[in-house]
Image (spheres, helix red, strand yellow):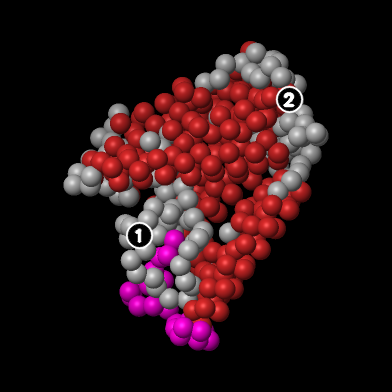
Amino acid sequence: MIHFGSPANEPQIAYTTLYVLPFYLSALTRPSPDLPRDSPTVIRARVRSVTLSCALCSVITICILSFYAHVPRLQILKLLGWYPIDIAGTAKPLLLTALLFAGPLFEKGVVDGKWKEWIRGRKLYECLDSWIGWRNYVAGPFTEELLFRSLLLPLALLSQPHASTSKLRLILLTPLYFGIAHIHHCYEFKLTHPRTPWLPTLLTTLFQLGYTTVFGWYAAFVFLRTGSLGSVVLCHAFCNWMGLPRLWGTVGRAVAGEVGAAEHVLDATVLGERSGDAGRERAPGAVAGRSHAGRSGKLPHLRGAAGTGRGEIAWTVAYYAVLFGGVLAFWKGFWVLTRSEAGLVDWQGR
């Protein structure tokens, strides 16, 4: 546990600027109608940019902790969540997050029959076999969690004068910068979709700001509880892969006409991450009631009577039962599965 009251600045604005601003300084990373953000050239340039930004911010944070706050070297590594490496402690928050997505996992693995592909590791290979997948599940989660959790939270924690009030402020306020860092996608979207009216563009941006901030709250809590950078990186990558859980609609067939903005959990990340199987982009406008069409455009065969009315009802009832059961298990395991001796703050009395 760390001691509160050590003076330290809160460079959230500076770090967020260093992360986002370089995108607009280079022709390779600057958004334009002729150069989509999913181009391998753009992805490589943006990954290089955020890697350099994170390296610079890491040096700044270590210098502040070492020379200004006088934190011992080993304690600095602990504050940043880099040491010690606890495999079990890192995996437990991922299990907790998976409980929240028990319904979608059931739909993908059982209803869509993808569990065999998961066992073979085929999906993991497909996800990382493209620059989009590398961005979505490796570069994006790692650099964002490094900057917004590992580097910013320790500095903000040291600047809090009272331990009793700091935990809530850290969890609720610091992730706002993580959400704000995605607002520039409103400009990028409007630039590449000039015919889209401003109202839906702004509503989409507000929605993205909302769910990235909510995830930021969760990631900040997990990081403070576990003191592990790896745990929040895994949770971030997993959420990118899953997308937002289905909260309406039937299970067992493609559902047409359900349009909304709930397809991607962290879709509009700073790097332009998009969630989805195998790192592939889903069709614009796809939502939680998404199509199950594969590469061929045909619906996958569903075992049993999934194509019939009874089959759909059975799958749908099972899905929502698993979904709400997972939410209940998530709630019950919220404190247990995030407990760690490496936690950054004392949660006794909460």
Circle 1 sits on which residue?
Answer: 259
- Quadrant of residue 322 in the image? bottom right
Instruction: Say whether residue 301 is magenta.
Output: yes
Q: Is residue 57 left or right of residue 208?
A: right
Label 1 sits on what residue type?
Val
- Quadrant of residue 99 in the image? bottom right
If the image is split into quadrants, where does the C terminus sit? top right
* Marker disc for residue 164: 2
Point 43% across, 34% down: residue = 181
Q: Nearer the viewer, residue 79 or 339?
A: 339
Residue 9, image x, y percentages: 57, 16
Residue 75, image x, y percentages: 72, 27
Q: Secondary structure at mark 2?
A: helix
Q: Secondary structure at mark 1?
A: loop
User: Can the viewer see residue 91 in this picture?
Assistant: no
If the image is split into quadrants, where does the N terminus sit? top right
Instruction: Say whether residue 66 is magenta.
Output: no
Q: Is residue 67 left or right of residue 190?
A: right
The correct choice, above or below, for 348 with respect to 161 in the image is below
Q: Main secondary structure of the magenta part?
A: loop
Q: Residues within 10 Å of mark 1 (few under 14, many from 20)?
A: some
Residue 63, image x, y percentages: 59, 18
- Quadrant of residue 110 in the image? bottom right
User: Can the viewer see residue 217 in this picture?
Assistant: yes
Point 43% across, 54% down: residue = 262
The CA distance from mark 1 to mark 2 is 44 Å
Residue 281, image x, y percentages: 36, 58
Image: magenta residue range: 288-310
